Image (tube, rainbow, N blue to C red):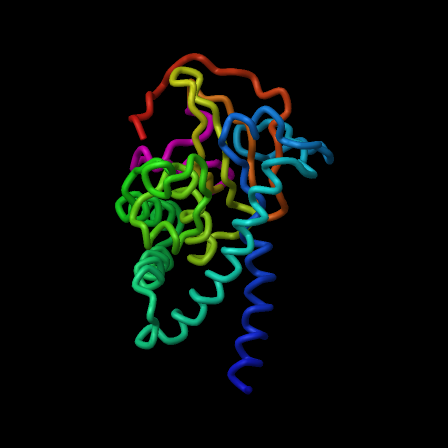
Amino acid sequence: MGFSLRSFALRAVMLGFGLALAAPIAELNAASLLSPGPATLLRQSTEPFGLATSLLAGGGLHDKWLGVQRQLADELVQLAACESDRAGCASPEALRFLAIVDAGRARNGRARLGEINRAINLAIRPGSDLATYGEPDVWATPLATFARGSGDCEDYAIAKFVALAKAGVAPEDLRIVVMHDLLGGEDHAVVTARLDGHWLTLDNRRMAMIEDADIRSFRPTFVIDQHGVYRYVDAPPVTEAAWRPAAR
């Protein structure tokens, strides 16, 4: 009974942490992008790309993330248990994920961001949801992705978002940004992290971290932080290509 009470208490604490850490993430399929739900609370900003945003209050993007939040709450409990007793941890994927978090914690500043970006890029094989899960649009939590060993852009982004937060990056300095590739016609998710007042992008398609101001041929559409998912307001398209991402 004592173990059950402790487990319940830990689960409640980690659920609260999970809800703060894992804010609603924008859905990438075309139907959701065309009908993202009502938007409120316009904010000007210090956001990546320096554009104003408005909070999404409902719709497909919001609903999609609710399921991810529930799964992530369970995973955070599991990660906390494994972190406190690694010898007794029965989850190989949790231990691999925590090793990446440890390596990030051992570094500071840009080196911390680069370590986690590189490690997660190498830990996950690029793969479509259809090939990995047999479904066209699956949003996976970090341990689910590590167990499968493959994922697409939002799976990398979710894993980096959680790993960076656990490694000590402040929540107010972390975002997930959904962008539309104006050349390739695809939607793509990356993590952005603020360092010394500049937003760096952590992309599964490259090891180098690029400032938001240097990105071309992509139009940002949605941004996610600890409070929710926001839509960029009147984001201007940028057509001059500074770099062309490799195929996923």
Pick out the residue farthest to the top.
Answer: 239
Residue at 32% across / 47% down in the picture? 120
Say which quarter of the image contains residue 84: bottom left
Rendering coords of residue 58 (x, y %): 68, 38
Image quadrant holding the N terminus, namely bottom right
Residue 209 shown in magenta? yes
Depth check, front residue: 13 or 212: 13
Residue at 33% across / 42% down in the picture? 132
Relative to 145, residue 135 above or below: above
Report the side of 216 relative to 37 (left or right).
left
Pick out the residue farthest to the bottom.
Answer: 2
Report the side of 144 relative to 37 (left or right).
left
The stretch in magenta equals: 195-215
Relative to 118, residue 234 above or below: above
Rendering coords of residue 56 (x, y %): 66, 36
Report the side of 134 relative to 195 (left or right).
left
Report the side of 96 relative to 72 (left or right).
left
Residue at 55% across / 65% down in the picture? 14
Relative to 175, residue 102 above or below: below
Rendering coords of residue 245 (x, y %): 33, 25
Image quadrant holding the C terminus, namely top left
Relative to 240, residue 226 above or below: below
Rendering coords of residue 186 (x, y %): 42, 23
Residue 59 shown in magenta? no
Residue at 61% across / 42% down in the picture? 63
Depth check, front residue: 9 or 66: 66
Pick out the residue farthest to the right.
Answer: 41
